[in-house]
């Protein structure tokens, strides 16, 4: 029981702290938040390594066992080699127009956009099935989702204008809302330590 609930409790506490720290400007809270971010970078490095090894292992076995869909495994290996190769061979991969940037902008970004749009459609259809407007609460929840889910350029501009006095927060939002904007790319190029 403890093996299941302890990790859940730690994730919950970390998630609540991450959300609440934006509202507590004390330096001790911000220092602890920075420490958590440093730990996160370390964990991400190991997670990427583990994920890459797992990806190679799964698709190698599909090719070795001559699975019916092994053609996709060849595509995965080609994409992995192309991305890693362009990243290692060209050190200036943050510059627009570099081979790594071309691969990222023309392959990774469209794939992610497709995946997240399919995910949003799936979540919306599942929510519609789960929250059929049979009660007042379900109707209010559907109405709130219909208001909150769509984002448009005008609301993004309004949020950006409200963040003009907080440049780091502005660019965090901009990286989420419009990562390919020249303003965001220029900020990231000048502040690679963030």
Image (cartoon, rainbow, N blue to C red):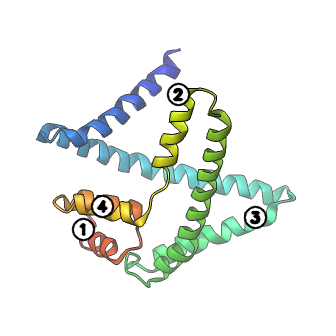
Crowding at dot 4, Cα within 10 Å, few <14 / some 14-19 / many 20+, comes out as few
| Residue ID for mark 2 | 137
Q: Residue furthest bottom?
A: 97
Q: Residue 67 in the image: state x and y as whole percent.
A: 85, 57
Element type at marker 4?
Answer: helix
Chain-order first, disc 1 or disc 4: 4
Crowding at dot 3, Cα within 10 Å, few <14 / some 14-19 / many 20+, comes out as few
Residue 158 is tagged as: 4
| Quarter placement of the C terminus | bottom left
Instruction: Give me the residue at 58% from left, 73% from top.
Output: 107
Chain-order first, disc 2 or disc 1: 2
In this view, 155 is above or below 81 = above
Element type at marker 3?
Answer: helix
In this view, 118 is above or below 19 = below
| Residue ID for mark 3 | 72
| Residue ID for mark 1 | 191
Instruction: Give me the residue at 14% from left, 37% from top.
Output: 28
Q: Separation of disc 2 and disc 3 at Cα?
A: 45 Å
């Amino acid at each position: 029981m403890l093996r299941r609930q302890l990790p859940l409790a730690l994730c919950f506490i970390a998630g609540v702290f991450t959300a609440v720290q934006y509202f507590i400007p004390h330096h001790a809270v911000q220092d602890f938040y920075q420490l958590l971010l440093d730990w996160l970078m370390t964990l991400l490095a190991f997670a990427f390594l583990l994920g890459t090894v797992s990806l190679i292992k799964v698709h190698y076995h599909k090719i070795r066992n001559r699975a019916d869909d092994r053609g996709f495994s060849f595509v995965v290996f080609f994409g992995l080699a192309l991305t890693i190769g362009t990243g290692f061979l060209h050190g200036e991969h943050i510059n627009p127009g570099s081979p790594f940037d071309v691969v990222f902008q023309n392959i990774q970004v469209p794939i992610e956009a497709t995946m997240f749009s399919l995910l949003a459609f799936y979540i919306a259809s599942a929510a519609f099935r789960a929250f059929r407007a049979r009660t007042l609460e379900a109707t209010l929840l559907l109405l709130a989702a219909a208001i909150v889910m769509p984002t448009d350029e005008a609301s993004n501009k309004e949020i950006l204008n409200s963040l003009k006095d907080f440049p780091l927060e502005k660019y965090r939002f901009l990286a989420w809302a419009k990562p390919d904007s020249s303003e965001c790319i220029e900020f990231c190029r000048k502040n690679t330590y963030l």
